[in-house]
Image (cartoon, grey):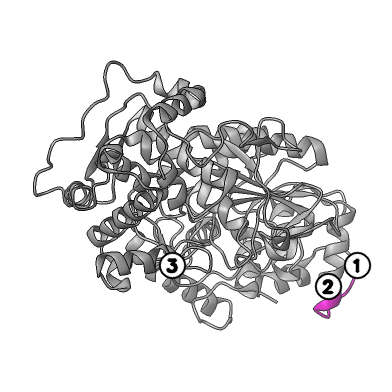
Amino acid sequence: MPRSTVARTRARASVLAALTVTALVAAGQPAGAAPAPPAAEPLNRAFDRAAQEYGVPRDLLAAVGYGESRLDGHAGQPSQANGYGVMHLASNPENRSLEKAAALTGEPAERLRRNTAANILGGAAVLRDHADRLGLDRAQRRDVNAWYPAVARYSEAEGPAAALYADTVFTFLAQGLTATAPGGEQVRVPSRPVAPDKDEVSAAGVYAQSPDYPSGLWVPAYSGNFVVGRKATVDKVIIHTTQGSYAGSISWYQNPASKVSAHYTIRSSDGEVTQSVREKDTAWHAGSVNSSSVGIEHEGYVDNPAWYTEAMYRSSAALTQHLAARYSIQKNRSHIIGHSEAPGATHTDPGPNWDWNHYMQLIGGTPGDSLTFPSYALQQSGSSGPQVTAVQQLLNAQGYAAGTADGIFGPATKSATQAFQRARSLTADGAVGPKTWTALLSAGTTPALARGSSGDAVKRLQRSLTAALGTTVGVDGSFGPSTETAVRSYQTSRGLGVDGKVGPATWGALQAGR
């Protein structure tokens, strides 16, 4: 049963300090809900209708949707937690909000996944169901602060993860927001003072400090979603995008069904950092390089650049600098890499909207030249990201019209790839695998190279050897012992004369994609 008005007033006073800074951005009395939107604003109309039908404060509903999705339904595609739409109605072993919304609204699950208005209605129904189970009466439901426990329950998380989720929503209410949804419609939530009634979440001791990074929080992952200890030396940082919300992703690491985790997760709005796996342990985030890397997840979706805020970039860069110093990680693009660049990766994050040059500048590292990667993955129709951009740049430089280097592997890129493959007597399938990568990366002049050589031709050699051998050859433009070893390995495996030097025969084999 809900507590008395006096008890709730005391509780609000005791937790107000947690949101004081954000609450003070509002001046005067709380603003009312936004005026009724015109017919040309379907998203605003959907929030208004759902709020009215289920008695949920409209601005609270919009703040929950903004926190979950930035008001982007992603055309019915699921998040990593199998959540759908603006309100992230989920269907996984621990969160059945999609099924609950279907039962409460009578809408079929498929419509809730893909139709934004139905999805928002479903989210409102689920929130109201949580409020009813908490015993909120009509008067309490009119007080946005009384909804804090219902919002925490909406996350389907527990303890600190639930508090992170609800605190984020109430911070949006305190600060206010103006969000531009896909298609250009704006949704506004006016700022107001907030004093959330944390009925189910203790105000004291909710958050613990990160054991490895002093400025971060600690919300541990489920013990079955990572491995204690490591089998390799940490020598790289992997940059990820969550494909979900901050608190939702942290909760997902706590879910025994997820079988995933990350060491750190960073919030989009303000750069807040939460650690979920100790650095000494192996998080499950990037397949074959888990044991030798630290994984940093960034709240958001790869197809929406709005998530990659300056606050997030700077917070993440400070964390990466900290990790680089602790583990002597080289601050270059061979050791600070995206999930999509990890050997054997099937993911595309952080995607083409992640600004690598800016990020590398922030960490004080070497930006790279946009062609150098620790490994070269298969690129084909439908692929996207920095390696597609590299393919397009290489094709265009060789006179094959791949179109604008926009990181999207479309028809023009495929056609240019096929033309290049035919010219090199390669299978003209339009996909860039190891042979085509090797031929593309080595294309150009063929000067004699040996230990002691340096310059751009050595970089081309090092990149093409990385593609050909399937193992990383450091790209520094200096022909040293490690490059000579790689050359000898390539010559041996291709039946060439083995002398560790690069002459016409070795260049010819590389440029033919052998």
Q: CA distance from mark 3 to mark 2?
A: 31 Å
Residue 190 in the image: x percent, y percent? 27, 30
Among numbered discs 3 and 1, the one appearing first in the sequence: 3
Of the 4 image quadrants, the one containing the N terminus is: top left
Q: Which residue type carries mark 3?
A: Thr
Do the residues bearing badges 1 and 2 touch, measured as CB atoms within 8 Å? yes
Q: CA distance from mark 1 to mark 2?
A: 8 Å
Q: CA distance from mark 3 to mark 1?
A: 37 Å
Q: Which mark is residue 499?
A: 1
Q: Nearer the viewer, residue 378 or 438?
A: 378
Q: Is residue 313 above or below residue 471?
A: above
Of the 4 image quadrants, the one containing the C terminus is: bottom right
Residue 179: say if magenta. Answer: no
Q: Which mark is residue 491?
A: 2
175 vs 42, left or right, is right
118 vs 375, left or right, is left
Tell me the chief SS of the magenta region.
loop
- Marks 1, 2: nearer the viewer: 2
Q: Which mark is residue 413?
A: 3
**Span of residues in magenta:** 491-499
Say which element carries label 2.
Answer: helix
Residue 67 in the image: x percent, y percent? 41, 45
